[in-house]
Amino acid sequence: MQESPPSNFSDYIKQALTVSLSCSKAYKITSLSLFILIFIISWSLLQTLIITSTEEIPMVMLRSFIDAASFIFFCHFGVRPFLKLFIVNRSISLKKVMHYLGLLFTLAIISLQLSLVITEMEYFNKLDITQIQFANEEGAFNINTDKRFFFVVGTLEQAFNFFMWGLFYLAWHMYQAKKQMQKQMQLAQIQQLTNQLSPHFLFNTFNSIRALIYEDQDKAADTLTQLSELFRTHLQAHLRAESSLLEEWQVSQRYISIEQTRLEERLTVKVDIDEALYQQKLPTLTLLTLLENATKHGISPNAEPGFINISAVKKDDEFWQLNVVNSLDANSSAASTKTGLKNIKTRLELMFNNQANFSYQKSATQFSVTLVLPYA
């Protein structure tokens, strides 16, 4: 939840400190990379202008380190809090822009004053670039830059550097917000597709219980208990667009139990799931949909015993594979619109950005569905 903007300076300092102490891993890595880049550039420039002997190398390295650290410090504790508290994901006004520019120039002046103080230290006095000596074939000559002119130019340059850092920071936030919005839209689409599964599942399950009522009331009561447990688990999973393989299997086990009670010896289920894959992700109700499809079109229409084989195995270092194979009678008259399969394919494309592979094969005796999914 986004905090309300501070109403006074004291409140701003408190919130700015909170913002500064909270940052993402990606931000830390980017800041470290920028620090290294600035250090290298500063070292290269000072080495070109200043170093005349190996004794000066440690001094130049230390100064380059201080300059790089100073820039990151002012950006992180000065520029970033203002952007987070007043600009990012908020309406922008002329007043805010003027305050922001004023902050940049204030930070630039403080940063430059700090740099001048460091330069006046005895250890760093050789790094005073306001007095640089150049040499050519005609001899050596000095360029003495007026310190007031140097201060003005330095302030403008530092303010511009802070401005560019802030610009890239805002661009990064806009990119992240766009990605988040796209992800939320994808999750909404997946959730919408998940909602389409429920009526189909309910219709077939209640038909199974209805058939049991006339055969064995005790079994019908047990099956109804299983169904209530299934719905409890199903409703919890139903609120999410994705689930782990373990959660999918727990929901599916209840469904299998219901169908085995109804079909008895006509249904044999063989399971081979690598437990190391239990935490891998897939769209919610994927496995249940495959099993429901296999039962409806492969087992229920046939008088002869049938089977469903479920396997989840590692494919390689990047992908794992889920297979559901069911027996099939070539003479079966059960019609299939393949709505469930199309639904799964669409949700896989949304969830994994087309990195997952979905395929199925049908022969005279069996129907096989294969999902090749990237590791989460």
Image (cartoon, rainbow, N blue to C red):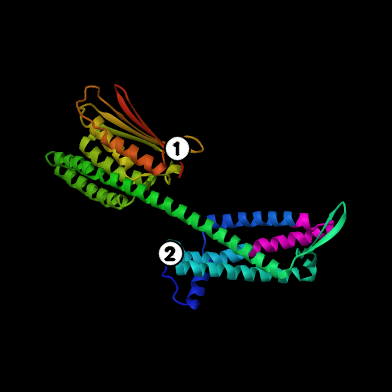
Q: Amino acid at mark 1?
A: Trp
Image height check: is 272 above or below 129? Answer: above
Give the left or right position of residue 319, taking residue 64 as reference: left
Give the left or right position of residue 253, taking residue 138 as reference: left
Q: Crowdedness of circle 2 by 10 Å Cα count: few (<14), some, many (20+)?
A: few
Confirm whether residue 14 shows in the render: yes
Q: Residue at x 29, y 44 (%)?
A: 193
Q: Earlier in the sequence, mark 2 or mark 1?
A: 2
Confirm whether residue 18 shows in the render: no
Q: Residue at x 43, y 70 (%)?
A: 5
| Residue 273 point in image, percent of width and height | 40, 39
Q: Furthest-left residue in view?
A: 214
| Residue 110 point in image, percent of width and height | 63, 71
Instruction: Tell me how many marks there are.
Output: 2
Which of the image's four quarters has the N terminus? bottom left
| Residue 345 point in image, percent of width and height | 34, 37
Q: Furthest-front residue in view?
A: 138
Q: Amino acid at mark 2?
A: Ile
Which of the image's four quarters has the C terminus? top left
Image height check: is 121 above or below 263? Answer: below
| Residue 198 point in image, percent of width and height | 24, 45
Indicate the secondary structure of the residue bearing disc 1: strand
Q: Identify which residue, 43 or 274, lies in the foreground.
A: 43
Residue 190 occupies quadrant: top left
Is 47 covered by the magenta stretch?
Answer: yes
Say which residue label 1 marks: 320
Say which residue label 2 marks: 92
Image height check: is 363 above or below 275? Answer: above
Q: Identify which residue, 203 or 75, lies in the foreground.
A: 75
Start and end of the magenta stretch? 46-70
Is 246 covered by the magenta stretch?
Answer: no
Q: Which mark is residue 193?
A: none
